[in-house]
Image: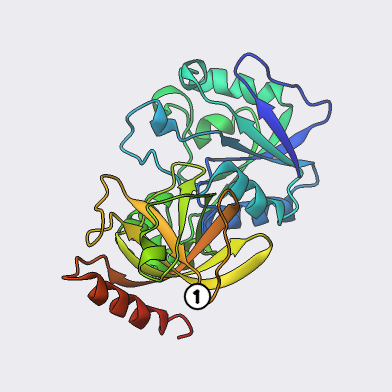
Amino acid sequence: MKKVELYSNNININEKDIAIILGYFDGVHLGHKEIIQKAINKTDLPLAILTFDKPVSTFINNGKSKEVLTSLDDKFSIIDRYGVDYFYVQHIDEDFLSMSAIEFIDYLKKLNVKEIYVGEDYKFGKNASGDIKLLKKYFDVFVINCVTFKGKKISTQTILNEIKNGHMAYSNSLMGQNYKVSGIVVEGHQNGSRIGIKTANIKLNDDYIIPRYGVYKVITHIEGSSYRSLANVGVHPTIDEENSPLIEVHIPNIDIDFYGKNIQVEFLDFIRPEMRFKSVQELVSQIKKDLTLLDK
């Protein structure tokens, strides 16, 4: 899959007709996957997917989260597995967001779009003034019904809310893959080393949604290896309480200096909420109990 950067004042016109899938695709959840798969099965044209470099809510207050489920790199790697030809990334700014519905249609024409694949609730243009009915006046449009899970429509916002509540197993089911954050291992306060439980502190690569404070069963990927691990999300209420939340992982039986290394953490399940213990000894005792749950 070829990645193509798009800017409002610099849109490369394709020489050949293309089919395109429209949407932000944060999380690339089961609903998104359904649209992608249907487009692949239907079209005979080169297939592109159009996404944005950041959430629209970064610029306008649309009631949606500014945090993300997937970074651009995460999104690319998930979609690349499906055999889409082009990964278009529109860098959004005030000019792009001020496009009227008709101006956005002209924008698609410049890309030589002939077929469009969208979910049934797709809107576009300033103030979401454009709809599927308007798109059909200019293109061959294929509408894919929303996917439901246990009778409820799957949406990115629903998944974000579930993660905020620590419902990792459920949110992972809605996405069709485990929630994952990526970052760099940075030096922390060395509290883990002092109590005999070394941790890797993560500086995140993107504005990922922060799960409910607590301890999680995770898989840690680093330097080509994967480890079943514990992750703590929170503010260290027992030792050196922080002003902002941290994500740190403890990989059992591994004593390697990972500072400066790229790390990915897949959240599997919530174990318990973050707690304030009366002593460091009580904290260590609880962590040892948490570790016994990794293989269950």
Residue at coordinates 76% horizontally, 45% vertically from top-left? 1
Residue 129 position, x and y percent, is 42, 26
- Is 69 situated left or right of 115 in this image? left
Q: Amino acid at mark 1?
A: Pro
Classify mark 1: residues with Cα within 10 Å, few (<14), some (14-19) or many (20+). Answer: some
Residue 75 position, x and y percent, is 59, 48
Residue at coordinates 79% horizontally, 41% vertically from top-left? 46
The residue wearing badge 1 is: 252
Q: Nearer the viewer, residue 168 or 149?
A: 168
The way the protein has been coloured in the rendering is rainbow
Name the quadrant of the C terminus.
bottom left
- Is 19 situated left or right of 129 in this image? right
Residue 127 position, x and y percent, is 39, 25
Q: Nearer the viewer, residue 81 or 137?
A: 81
Residue at coordinates 35% horizontally, 59% vertically from top-left? 233
Residue 78 position, x and y percent, is 63, 54
Label 1's element? Answer: loop
* Residue lying at the far front of the rendered structure: 194
Residue at coordinates 51% horizontally, 52% vertically from top-left? 27
Q: Nearer the viewer, residue 48 or 256?
A: 256
How many labels were placed on the picture?
A: 1
Is 155 above or below relative to 150? above
Is 283 above or below relative to 234? below
